[in-house]
Amino acid sequence: MAITVSTVLYPQVTDRDWGSRNGLRPLNTTISFKGSVPATRIRLMDVPLKVSITLPQECAGITPVVNLGPLDFMYCGRSLLSVLCSRQEEMQKLKIPLPFLPLHPSFNPYNTQSWVRLMNSVQRWLLTEVVNRQSLEWVWGCEAFWMAYVAAYPEFPYGKWTHWSPKISPKGCFLQDWLAKRDAVVLGEDTLVFGDNADYISARCAIWGRLQELISLVYDRSIVATST
């Protein structure tokens, strides 16, 4: 007998970067599974899951797009946050001036240009304001830069992307984790790779969540400015 579980979600309505009509912000949803099945009876890759999305009649002009990614990919970068959180008292004492915060009210975590602008702002801050490259400020800033950079160019190190300053090394917890998983996300015997822009939504949503956690370590105000 098939088991069906349902829930009601409430995505936010947005009128930015979606044309002349309102749209719905993407949702980053995880699905976990409790219990087990005998290994001799069924292979994990043979388990079909049916996901249905029902929109109200007033949203008839919107078509849901479902993107799939394994949990460890969606939430890469946790190790970095664990390290910085363990030194949170030091981070809070730094009182880092962050001229790129709060983000402009038009910032859209699912829009390429929003991430490009943030990436450039963080890079400029690192190169002009942070002197000691062995400091926590530099470590924090580099992690923020690579999160913004990867969100701007989700195909990195493949596809098209812009060069960054050679003073910013391509290393760090987040970037190492991303590169290890970006080549191919292996699911059993199959390989999942990015296909088109629709596949970027889940990655950007996950990175946005990680970036907010990273920023909250040193910045206690609203990350995105409110419209005036």
Image: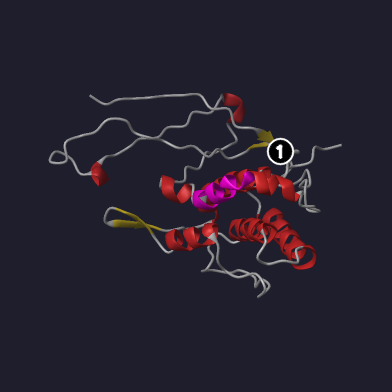
In the foreground, 13 or 96: 96
The secondary structure that most of the magenta stretch takes on is helix
Position in image of residue 52 (x %, y %): 42, 32
Which residue is rendered at x = 64% and y = 32% of the image? 12
Asked which secondary structure carries label 1, the reply is loop
Which residue is rendered at x = 47% and y = 42% of the image? 66
Which residue is rendered at x = 64% and y = 61% of the image? 142
Position in image of residue 203 (x %, y %): 53, 51
Position in image of residue 58 (x %, y %): 61, 26
Quadrant of the rendered image containing residue 33: top left
Q: Is residue 93 above or below residue 175?
A: above
Residue lying at the far left of the rendered structure: 40
Report the residue marked by disc 1. Answer: 21
In the foreground, 153 or 134: 134
Question: Is 151 inside the magenta-drawn segment?
Answer: no
Which residue is rendered at x = 12% and y = 41% of the image? 40
In the foreground, 199 or 211: 211
Instruction: Characterize the local packing of mark 1: few (<14), some (14-19) or many (20 or more) Cα atoms within 10 angstroms.
Output: few
Q: Is residue 20 visible?
A: yes
Quadrant of the rendered image containing residue 1: top left
Per the rendered image, the range of residues in magenta is: 78-88
Position in image of residue 38 (x %, y %): 16, 36
Residue lying at the far right of the rendered structure: 228
Q: How many marks?
A: 1
What amino acid type should be assigned to the residue bearing mark 1? Arg
Q: Is residue 108 visible?
A: no
Q: Is residue 113 left or right of residue 76?
A: right
Q: Which coloring applies here?
A: secondary structure
Question: Is 85 inside the magenta-drawn segment?
Answer: yes
Residue lying at the far bottom of the rendered structure: 166
